[in-house]
Amino acid sequence: MDTILSTDAISVVKKAEMYCSREGIDIDLVYKLPERELEIISERSKELPTLYFVSVDLLRRRLKNGCFLLRRGDEILGHIFAHEHHVKGRSVYERACLWVNRDYRNYNLGLLLMSRMTELFTESFLISIAQTPKVHYYNELLGMTHVTLAQMSKVLVEELEKLGKLRDELNYRYYVNPCFLAESKQLK
């Protein structure tokens, strides 16, 4: 499968879905997972430098918001979670724990997972805090907008700091979905 060369995210996501169908890979939205699978995901987050460590307890809490899984049989080939934060009485969901098995990374499955999670939270405040240029590009393809800390409300910046989500803008970028962008003034 080709990697993205254009900005036609819809056709690339459809190709990733067709790849999954051909390869017998299921794409499931789940709200519960067996304890052993949560332990594997938690251990993976500890071992991989590209992921932040996520305890089993935190994964359990994130599962309540939904998790998209890529599976073939009992094997998890990819996942993405949503982490709920509260800012001024509003829920803000952060796409988190994106991972795709190394053997399947050239088929745009990360974009597929990001797309599904973005669609799930269309009517909610969704944020992506990312370091990787590829994820930045995917965020833009999915219609999310890059916002700097200077563009955010003081309250949101203070909340990000309290949550440990305030990042160095030289290395990290914040992206928000259209709902968040349109209503972010409410967080002042």
Image (tube, helix red, strand yellow):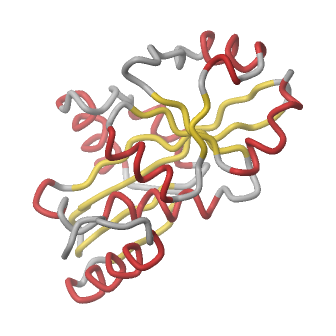
What residue sits 24% from the left and 27% below the top?
46
Residue 10 x/y as whole percent: 48, 75
Which sits in the foreground, 153 or 32?
Answer: 153
Residue 84: quarter of image: top right
Quadrant for the C terminus in the image = top right
Q: In this picture, is 179 found above or below 159? A: below
What residue sits 36% from the left and 55% below the top?
79
What residue sits 69% from the left and 59% below the top?
122
Residue 29 x/y as whole percent: 50, 66
Residue 75: quarter of image: bottom left
Which sits in the foreground, 18 or 185?
Answer: 185
Q: In this picture, is 31 found above or below 40? A: below
Which residue is farthest front?
6
Residue 8 x/y as whole percent: 44, 72
What residue sits 26% from the left and 61% below the top?
76
Q: How many marks?
A: 0
Which residue is farthest bottom?
22
Quadrant for the N terminus in the image = bottom left
- Left or right position of 103 against 100: left
Residue 186 x/y as whole percent: 89, 31
Residue 69: quarter of image: bottom left
